[in-house]
Image (cartoon, helix red, strand yellow):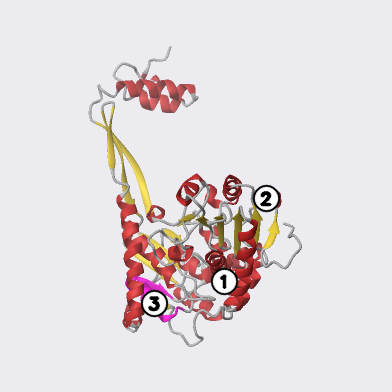
Amino acid sequence: MTATNGNHILQRITPQDVSMEIKHPVDPQALEQATAIIQELRNEQGTVADESLLQVAKRLGDIPADAASCIVSKEDCRAAFEGLSEQDRTALTNIYNRVKAFATMQRNSVQDMEMDIPGGKAGHTVSACRAAGCYAPGGRYPLPSSVIMTAVTARAAGCETVVLASPRPAPITLAAAHLAGADLVLCVGGAQAIAAMAYGSETIPRCDVICGPGNKWVTAAKSIVNGHCGIDMLAGPSEVLVICDDTANPTVVAADLIAQAEHDIVARAILLCTSHDIIDQVDQEVIKQLESLPEPNKSTAAEALKQSFAVLCDSIEQCIKISDDIAPEHLEIQTRDAMKVGQSCMNYGGLFVGEHAAEVLGDYGAGPNHTLPTGGTGRYTGGLSVFNFLRIRTWMRIDDKNESQSMVDDSIIMARLEGLEGHARAAETRSLTKTPAFKQPKV
């Protein structure tokens, strides 16, 4: 990407210069380090010993050197919730209720079903996995919202057990764990947390699915355990893309770009606009608003904005095409006929339609989940939902062998077309008219 000359905080690039390069979310060095940590933790039985986890957590700074356990008691989580101010407790509870309501509606949208087949019935059942492992970052900022988004969604799906891991959890994080109904809280982070949830220990149940955002070691560890258990996604740096025209409010657009940029120094904020004047005004607003941002948010956002950019597009249609190629994690539409424009966009993690639908409202519990696909993966997948914890399993039965003969005959023919004689003979044992080849007399 080549920036144009001028005193701009957002690089100015042409539509032709927009890079569609999709970087692999797993950092090679982090993968090597995560592999070493997991190998250190796993014992001969393939699980994690509590004592080994305790020592690794101490060495890597998750817990104090004199800590006797990695587990936070339910009593401590309840005390953290009860210790919140009324204002904080009310806000957290409101967010919980909205996320739970949305996730519950998602769960109710898919049900068991059955249909008639020749001679019988076929259908599917929908059931939750047994145990969910939820990760909530605990680094630069405490993220109780991630606790709500992961643990509440797992509960709404129907998971019997919910394990939460978060390094050096702040009281608000523990309060969120209590509200979300986490069964077990680990004050452990990084690859060691993912290993503990994936393989289990004497006190930590083995989880069937692990979800939630994290740093590069969390992402690397999730890539390692994927297959042994399920994962939601391999999340990369966070990103927002705003499509706007000459009706957009520069102050609002700038605030939304900064809100994303303060997440991380590798976050990315992108502006696609049909108005040169709006781009200039947004840029000046970003500079002005950034000046008043406190540290360390200001430095983080300023660094992230170095890899962010603005594109002057010929039309809204060109904005949509570029956005679909990028497939941003968060896509904001601030244009005329914003809903129509949004419905024309095909690839994104979460869509925020209109000036008042701030991406930050999605972060903090409008209802839809804020754990969303990054790095272009919105082209083929969606964000975290109850469906990550659900298994749709099919079944069939035959009640009338006479009525099923058309299926039997079709199966015999297809098996031999595929060269699978054993399949054909297995079908022939159900035939009322054909003798299986292995029962026929030798000539």
Nearer the observer, disc 3 or disc 1?
Answer: 1
Residue 336 percent location from the top left of the image: 50, 51
| Callout 3: SS | helix
Q: Is residue 25 left or right of residue 400?
A: right
Residue 73 percent location from the top left of the image: 35, 79
Q: Please give the residue where the numbered disc 3 appears in the rendered image.
A: 174
Residue at 42%, 67% in the rendered image: 364
Residue at 46%, 69% in the rendered image: 136
Q: Identify which amino acid the numbered label 3 is placed on.
A: Leu
Residue 67 in sight in this render:
yes
Q: Quadrant of the C terminus?
A: top left
Q: Residues within 10 Å of mark 3 (few under 14, many from 20)?
A: many
Q: Is residue 147 left or right of residue 216?
A: left
Q: Please give the residue where the numbered disc 2 appears in the rendered image.
A: 15
Q: Identify which amino acid the numbered label 1 is placed on.
A: Glu
| Callout 1: SS | loop
Q: Please give the residue where the numbered disc 1 appears in the rendered image.
A: 262
| Callout 2: SS | helix
Q: Quick check: marks 2 and 3 in contact, CB under 8 Å?
A: no
In the orientation shown, which residue stands out farthest toward the right? 5
- Measure how far apart labels 2 and 3 are at the Cα level: 46 Å
- Measure how far apart labels 3 and 1 are at the Cα level: 24 Å
Q: Quadrant of the N terminus?
A: bottom right
Say above or below: 266 vs 419: below
